[in-house]
Amino acid sequence: MSAAHFRQWLLPAVLIAALAALPFLGNAYLVTFTFTILIAYILGQSWDWVSGEMGYVNLGHYCFYGVGAYVFSIALVAHYPALFAMLVAAAITILIAVAVAVPLFRLHGDYFAFATLALLPLAEILAFNLTSITNGGDGIVLPIQSVLKASYLIALGVCVLAFFSTVWINSIRFGYALKSIRNDEEVAEVLGVRILPIKIKVLALSAAFASLAGAIQSWQMSYIDPPTVFGLNVALIPIAMVLLGGSGLRWGPLVGVIVLACIQQWLLVNIQSLQATVYGAIILLIGRFMPGGILRAPWLRNSRWFGALSQEHHEYIVEEKSGNKASTADTLPLPAIQVNRSKPLLECENLRMEFGGNVAVDNVNLKIMEGEIVGLIGPNGSGKTTLFNCISRVFDPTAGRIRLAGKDLSELRRDEIARLGVGRTHQIPRPFNDLTVQENIAIPLMFHDTKLSSQQAFLQAREFVAYAELEHRLTSRADSLSLQEKKALEFARALACKPKLLLVDEVASGLASSEVMRFVEHIRHVRDRYGITVIWVEHIFSALAQVVDRVVVLEQGAVIADGTLNEVVTNERVLESYLGGTVARAH
Amino acid sequence: MLELKNIAVDHGKLRALWDVSLRVERGELVALLGANGAGKSTTLGAIVGLYPLSEGSLVYAGAPLKNHTTAATVAAGIALVPEGRHLFPAMSVFENLAMGAYTQQARAGLEENMEKMFTLFPILKQKQKQNAGELSGGQQQQVAIGRALMSLPKLLLLDEPFIGVAPKIIAEIIETLRSIAEGGVTMLLVEQNVHRALDFSARAYVVENGRTVLEGERDALLNDPGFSNKFLGLD
Amino acid sequence: MTVDVIIQVLIGGVLLGGVYALVAFGLSLIYGIVRILNFAHGTLLAVSGVVASLIYASYHLHPVFIALLLAAATFVFGYLFYMALLHPLGRRNHFESTVGTVLVTVGALLMLSDITAVMAGATQRNIQLDFEAFEIGAIVVSSAQVKILLGITGLMLAIHLLLTRTWFGRALRAVTENRVGALICGVNSTRLKALTFAFGSTTVAIAGVLYAISFPVSPYMGFGLTVKAFTIVVVGGVGNLRGALLAGILLGVAESMTSLLWKPEWAPALSMILMLLILVAKPQGFGKKSA
């Protein structure tokens, strides 16, 4: 272990040891207070995995706490040993979490928050009414034992586990799946991330820890009843703590829990009545003035002492790669596809896409051969992006069939289509905004090839970043990039899907002509060197003219021309609808 | 009447317009041309106050606008027919038009102006109780234009008003616009179809990548062999 | 279980549902236009109900006066609350503004219920009107119920008129349908949002008075009610008032029928389960989707 490594772990080790020694040295008051902080942290951190990391604000998180408390108490009363009861509590809560995850995650955004919110009073009523199991309003009284030390130590253990789990999750593929969902779920899927299992796993993990918190705390309290474990006042507080500290940050939940717990304790001691009012006022003021959390406040970020606490979870490998970093396409870790020019790669048969009464794609028949570069043009609203969305399955076509290398795409999920070999860019770039350039590109690499570790993916990503000439922005957040940089990132990220078919949606608009030429070269290279077939939607004809083998013209969703660029540009109908008669006259 | 001097507009951290300058005199019909993503819609949005100006100045009727919000610009006499129309689909045609007269001054003349709209667009009188969402594309476009006119604008901005409209209706709408113009309304038209745009307007600007790159009278532009090339990027 | 009893209970359920619908109205407008999750919404009803009960017990003012008084107070409070605490958050990025509104409204919830509990005690109370009953066949209807019915109808009529006959109402509907479209018509977004927040809060305050006439109120019941209101709004469709009315009545009737036909303690739970099932089956609710 290197010296730096040792130093890094020394402080936490000392802290944990000190905390572990507390019940043997300190007074019961201090131990109890620290205990509540430990429990709150477990609750808060486990909440943050689903909410801060994945972006789904689960307002019913406390239900898992309550279920854990009840299952544990019932098992304990039935004379099972405490540790066993805790494990049973966790197991059953996980099962419940998995069961509700599937229907619940069909909801998004605010609807998800609403639905999870409703789970709390529902759980409370269930606890009140299922008296045969829960003893109803009387609650469950646990055998009186002096368990302060034991429960404290177990709580400390779970706490430490939760913290290290957070650090670990953020460095592996699973964590990046969470973060990509948080930023843009649809794009994540189109890049190859399989969404549903990730959501279920994180909810199960979150539930497990929350249930343990419930089990351990009820052991210590020796009594539970419905309002104690499901009541509102308690339910939203761990959430407020995490938000107060800074959701999604490594130290956010811990800081928030400590600060609010101290405030709560101070209030209990010093203010006789209206404690909840003062508490509420503090939460309100934080929300009004520091909603990103204390750790995101500018004055703290910039301070010398505390700035390090504000770090976001970012992985990057800063060591130099040995050998020279060439910026040509030759060094990209892409497979060189053998191209058979007479074999069709993409076939659209009678493809139709309707939204309500509006026909966006109208009986399109298209055959793209391997190794072709095909331009797709048409006036605004002619269905080009919709066609792309049908191919990558963002939309379900109303009728017709799409085949990729002979395989019917209608049976496949979006992430399966991505892994099959479809990569795409978007008209308006959609990077994962709060992730760095390197992370953005590493994500499709990780999910395309599951044998790749996240570390290896990061290394490979550097080559794509070099290719996109974004090395100087390697560790910058994507939302701080200029438009041109975002488009380069978008393109590189699509390539990182290791596609057979690359769908490029207006990557050149808004750029200077030299930048446009660079993209033209990239497109030519990826086809010549790696055999990638390209469909390119573009308005800038001079760019298309350099590389396309063929041009397809759409108007109001239908194909009105399909031939070489020259044929199309002199086609009367195309000129009339798209360019206006002026151009014909000027030629 | 309207002058934009070197304006810049940002969408969040992204600069959408870098340097746009244009001038529209009272009573003129001017076209704004350019490829997709060039910044035409953003320019109109900036004029009407949807986007704040990061740089540059906007002078209207001889003085810079005191308060650059949409409410203030509409009250000052600038109205926008936005791309995609942005009608209120579950509200009746009548109510859609009425909303155009939301500003205090326009409310007073609601009845009168409504009648004028119905004269200009007879089909709307017929469909006034129908929900706007049920109308055809061409009819919806007429509602959108009518709604903008209800605020009694002196300057009318139109953003690609002919998308999804049948050619016959386009011709009708153009005629109506001409008669409105004769009534003294100044117009700035964003249009992708160069031919149609220059048919309608006497003068045009070309916007590319957030900058105004070309300006000229109709005939000068049409006879310029480099014009279409520059516009389409065929150089 | 005779038909008369069922009808009796149904009437109670419809009235309860009507009050729920009123609470949900306010929330629907606030969420649809101001786009804010107001956690303290139901607590406003609780506070209003408790205060109304106190005033009635002390001064015996007519409930209509009490309602008007509370309506005016809540309107002002709501407007100021929005402008001072919620509007400034809109300038921040999406994550911070969402989180900020959660914290602000949760804080308000805690403050409101605690202050009310300290002022009035945490026990339940209501407006004890004198009991009179009317008989229609074998069905007994209390005067309190009639008053609630009148109150609900009156308020809904007022809301309907406001929405359809005034410029404010028209602007509200327009903003729900198409934000950009409303903006370019010259609608002052900030003022409209503040007025909507105030108006939505006022509706809930009046609903609180109505609720307290027949049902017990306590300072801490707000949250459960907020949850019900949320689910009603989502099922009925955001911004869709007719949908909210239907959903509210559905909920009220479901609760009452459950109490009657099964066990009363299950009534609140079953309705929640019902709503959750509907939400999952149809994630967009039954209302019209906004443009």
Image (spheres, helix red, strand yellow):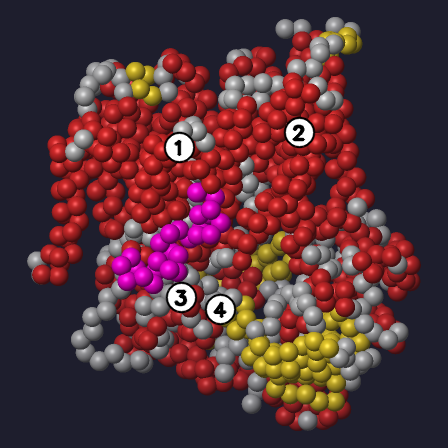
**Disc number placed over residue B13 in the picture, else none:** 4
Dots 2, 1 in contact, CB < 8 A = no
N-terminal-most mark, 1 or 3: 1
Q: Is residue B138 magenta?
A: no
| Disc 3 residue type (three-letter) | Ala
x then y, percent, for residue A435 = 37, 61
- At a point 88% along the width and 74% down the height, the residue shown is B183
Q: Mark 2 = which residue?
A: C207
**Disc number placed over residue A478 in the picture, else none:** 3
Dots 1, 3 in contact, CB < 8 A = no
What residue span does the magenta drawing correspond to?
A282-307
Q: Secondary structure at mark 3?
A: helix
- At a point 53% along the width and 76% down the height, the residue shown is A509
Q: Mark 1 = which residue?
A: A271
Q: Is residue A385 left or right of residue A467?
A: right
| Disc 2 residue type (three-letter) | Ala
Measure how far apart labels 4 and 1 are at the Cα level. Answer: 47 Å
Q: Is residue A571 left or right of residue C150?
A: left
| Mark 3 or mark 4, whichever is nearer to me | 4
